[in-house]
Image (spheres, grey):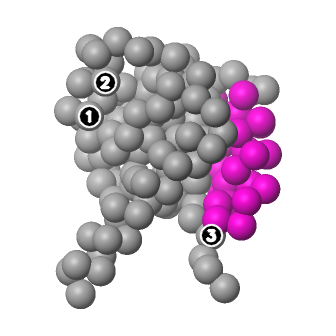
Amino acid sequence: MVERKKIVIAEDQKILREGLNSLLSSTADFEVVGEAEDGLDAIRCVKKYNPDLLLLDLSMPKMSGISAIKDIKDQMPETKILVLTVHESEEYILEVFKLGADGYCLKDANYSELVMAINSILSVNVQQKSEQN
């Protein structure tokens, strides 16, 4: 049996967060272990659940996703971060990658594109581990 990849979803819009949880949890590959509604809660969830991947919105209350990326990568650099956002600006894209995000996906992507982005990021981690052995 293949181990399911643990995911935390950080999204301030409850219906979107719940929908993503439902979609991702319905696959054999993923297990949503936590949800966060703001950047501070995202950091707490990553520390608590040690997920393989954080699916992170950029525009959230209390602490933006951009600020959360820096804190998470400083404290738990092995956690992969896929930004899921409406922001198409090159400014945002460059900033999040500079801070350590592993991927960037627009919210107008379809479900298969999102799963492809998640799998792509997680497979890089698997490839790096196998190259070290």
Question: Which residues make up the magenta segment?
Answer: 16-37
CB under 8 Å between discs 2 and 3: no
**Where is residue 24 shown, x and y percent of the image?**
70, 50
Q: Is residue 40 left or right of residue 21?
A: left
Q: Is residue 39 part of the magenta span, yes or no?
A: no
First along the sequence among labels 1 and 3:
3
> What residue is shown with label 2?
93
* Amino acid of disc 2: Ile
Whole-number angstrom distance, CA of label 1 to CA of label 3: 26 Å
Whole-number angstrom distance, CA of label 2 to CA of label 1: 6 Å
**Where is residue 67 shown, x and y percent of the image?**
35, 27
Residue occupying the point 57% across, 35% down: 10
Q: Is residue 22 part of the magenta span, yes or no?
A: yes
CB under 8 Å between discs 2 and 1: yes
Name the mark on residue 4.
3
Mark 1 falls on what kind of element?
A: helix
Mark 2 falls on what kind of element?
A: helix
Bin the neighbour count of mark 3 within 10 Å (Cα to Cα): few under 14, some 14-19, many 20 and up. Answer: some
Whole-number angstrom distance, CA of label 2 to CA of label 3: 29 Å
Q: Nearer the viewer, residue 109 or 50?
A: 109
> What residue is shown with label 1?
97
Q: Is residue 18 left or right of residue 55?
A: right
Residue occupying the point 26% across, 14% down: 91
Name the mark on residue 73.
none
**Where is residue 107 shown, x and y percent of the image?**
57, 24
Find residue 110 and report its image quarter.
top right
* Amino acid of disc 1: Phe
